[in-house]
Image (cartoon, grey):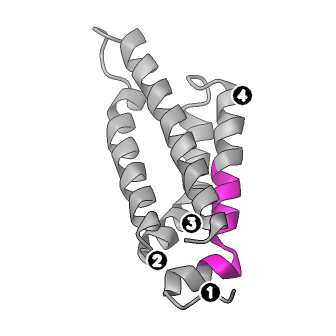
Amino acid sequence: MPSRIRFALTMLWVAWCISICAFAAHLYEARGSSADLYSIIGAPAALTQALLIYLISRRNNIARVIVLSMAVPALIVALVFFSAKVSSLRLVFETLLRGTALVLLLTPGAAQWFKRTPLPE
């Protein structure tokens, strides 16, 4: 696995862990109250993210395309619906992590790796 892919996957997993911790904190704070949109969408979104990151690590190009095509709509949804519930610092940090990882997944070396062609030394 090329180092840029490994670094991109690490950044995606770190962003995912931050999201999971924030989601767990939200569930703890909202215990007993009625379910809100963040509580309902949080678990399926986290599981889907984890599955896609895992599939990317297994060289699944379809998962990479899905992640790349859903990045902008997911950011828009996060800004519109969850900006009141999410701290600005966390949103910026996660966006930087995920954005940098997506750029690294678009490099020519990454494309070669996903095609399973040997990388030049």
Mark found first going from the N terminus, 1 or 4: 4
Q: Give the residue number, with chain letter if any, for mark 3.
A: 68
**Mark 3 and mark 2: Cα distance apart in space:** 10 Å
Q: Nearer the viewer, mark 1 or mark 2?
A: 1
Q: Nearer the viewer, residue 6 or 76?
A: 6
Mark found first going from the N terminus, 3 or 4: 3
User: Which amino acid type is shown beneath numbered disc 3?
Assistant: Leu
Asked if the magenta segment contains residue 104, the reply would be yes
User: Which amino acid type is shown beneath numbered disc 2?
Assistant: Asn
The answer to whether residue 71 is above or below residue 83 is below
The mark found on residue 89 in the picture is 4
Q: Which residues are magenta?
A: 98-110
Q: Nearer the viewer, mark 3 or mark 2?
A: 2
User: Which amino acid type is shown beneath numbered disc 1?
Assistant: Leu
The answer to whether residue 117 is above or below residue 28 is below
Q: Give the residue number, with chain letter if any, for mark 2.
A: 61
For the N terminus, the image quarter is bottom right
